[in-house]
Amino acid sequence: MMNVEVTEDVLVAKLRRENQEYQRWEQEHRKLEDALMTFAAHRYLTPEEEVERKRVQKLKLAAKDRMMDIMRRSRAVPA
């Protein structure tokens, strides 16, 4: 019997095509990454901007965690 592992890239491609929840979280993750890039473009941040940057970082991490959870659940489902 041959044990075939699904590579992460293949799984991500499948989820991008077939899983709306994954698609939403990935889109949210990209949006938050874009927001962080605007903060990175500033030489200095005001205290309020720093607080917002940290908030966005936490939201981005939460989105990534949700994406990884979906990937784990997808691996657990037999093909």
Image (cartoon, helix red, strand yellow):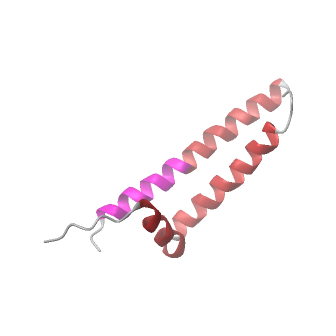
Q: Position of residue 46 (x, y in %)?
A: 85, 26
Question: Horizontal and vertical percent for residue 48?
Answer: 82, 28
Name the quadrant of the C terminus: bottom left
Residue furthest to the top: 47
What stretch of residues is rendered in magenta?
A: 64-76
Please report the residue visible at 52 percent of the width from the left and 63 percent of the height from the top.
Answer: 22
Quarter of the image that includes the N terminus: bottom left
Q: Is residue 20 above or below residue 50?
A: below
**Residue 37: image x %, image y %?**
77, 44
- Horizontal placement of 46 versus 66: left or right? right
Quadrant location of residue 75? bottom left
Give above or below for 33 relative to 8. Answer: above
Q: Residue at 30% x, 64% y: name it.
A: 5
Most frequent secondary structure within the magenta stretch: helix
Q: Is residue 66 left or right of residue 73?
A: right
The residue at the far front in this view is 2
Q: Position of residue 58 (x, y in %)?
A: 61, 38
Left or right: residue 8 versus residue 59 is left
Which residue corresponds to the image point at 35% horizontal and 65% vertical from the top-left? Answer: 6
Q: Is residue 62 magenta?
A: no
Give the total number of marks visible in the rendering. 0
- From what the image shows, is residue 53 above or below residue 67? above
* Residue occupying image coordinates x 43% and y 53%: 69
Q: Tell whether 35 sits left or right of 59.
A: right
Please say whether residue 71 is one of the residues in the magenta stretch.
Answer: yes
